[in-house]
Amino acid sequence: MGAGGFAQATPAPASLKDVYETAWARQPEAQALAARRDAVQAQQRAAGAWTPEPPALAVAAKSDRFTRNDGARELEAAIAIPLWLPGERRSNGALADSAAAALESRVEAARLRLAATVREAWWSWQRTRIDAEMARGQWDSARRIAADVARRAQAGDLARADRHQADGAVAAAEAAVAQAEAATTAALQQLRALTGGAAITAIADPAPDEPEPASADAPPHPALAELQDRAAVAERAAALAATQSRANPELTLSATRERGSFDERYGRTVTLGIRIPLGAGPRHDSRVAAARADAMEAQAQLALDRARLQSEGEAAVARVHAARAQLAAAERRAALARETRGFFDKSFRLGETDLPTRLRIENEAFDAERQAARSRIELAAAISTWRQALGLLPQ
């Protein structure tokens, strides 16, 4: 299905969670998940079977028809049944169970990695949206001031230079709008690339909820769970390799029907035998050493990632506190700037303030409004990053 068909078949995402779910449905891990689950279930069934491999049937016939043709005939049918080595079946079952758990943790870790990518693209888009919205507001304000200046200049209350200065402010604001909208389009395209080109509907309040304190029975972080399960699989594989010190023995049961010549009656015999391979030697040692190395590597990586995730979580909490403080300061500044703009707007209309001062105050007010709006987005993004560090998916 093409990108356009995908966009038509699914509703337009309207939140971070919607965008994430749409992006996850397109991931190779999501599309192959059902088949991989079937594979591990088949592995578990194989581990619970009575034999490590299916039995083999052999049929052989011997005759002297093309030589002396004395009537010698022999027909043999045999079945070979592989046998589990001591402890092999139990180890194989433990490995299959670990593989099933590792598959689920691998998928959850992949979901979390995708969530980090989607979150980054989402908040980048939100920042550019705020910048574009504020730029359009500043452009509207500049046009209103320019219209007032033009009327007063025509009436002789203001100089022609003031009109040129006001028109220049309009042109600068218009250029800022074009630049902000281009950045918004670029950020939106990056986000849509994750959803296969699906149209995205913006929401009014993108702020996520702060995470709840972790409880004692909370599930482990998906990244740590993946490494723990990988280490468990490697350990089970090492245990299985240790039991497989030789190839599987085989129990053989054969029945033979034979005669020596035409005047003899057929005789029947039954043979029961067992085939016991000798030790595997260096090949076995190599498999055991490789499996143990994988287990050691996974355990070492687990320790490193646990320390890294703890540091990331602490840093995320610090960023949330800093973003909250910045938002409070920015909102205070924006409130003061709005009041100041009201004062100077009134004094400008009364002719008590010149145009450069009026434009400067207007720019300062919009800069304060922009900072407050960006601070709200930064706080929401910091909380989202905090949730990501805790291993929580978008909600």
Image (spheres, grey):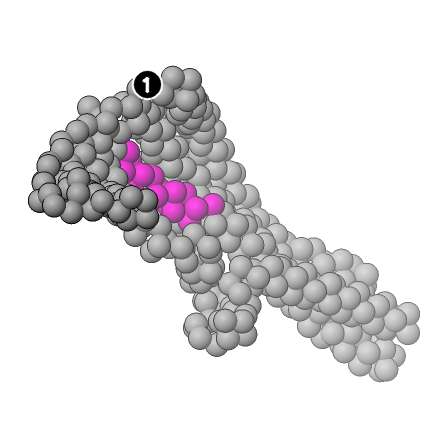
| Residue marked by disc 1 | 279
- Residue 208 placement, left or right of 157: left
Residue 211 in the image: state x and y as whole percent. Answer: 36, 44
Start-end of magenta stretch: 95-113
Q: In this view, does 178 lie above or below 73?
A: below
Residue 380 in the image: state x and y as whole percent. Answer: 48, 50
Q: Which of 374 and 348 is in front in this view?
A: 374
Residue 88: name its quadrant. top left
Q: Nearer the viewer, residue 30 or 135?
A: 30
- Residue 72 placement, left or right of 163: left
Residue 146 in the image: state x and y as whole percent. Answer: 78, 74
**Residue at coordinates 29% horizontally, 23% vertically from top-left?**
277
Q: Which amino acid does label 1 sit on?
A: Gly
**Residue 85 visible within the image:** yes
Residue 57: name its quadrant. top left
**Residue at coordinates 84% horizontally, 68% vertically from top-left?**
168
Is 219 magenta? The answer is no
Task: Name the element at disc 1.
Answer: loop
**Residue at coordinates 22% horizontally, 35% vertically from top-left?**
82
Is 105 magenta? The answer is yes
Q: Which of 129 and 173 is in front in this view?
A: 129
Mark 1 neighbour class, 10 Å CA radius: few under 14, some 14 to 19, many 20 or more: few
Q: Nearer the viewer, residue 87 or 204?
A: 87
Q: In this view, does 214 lie above or below 380?
A: above
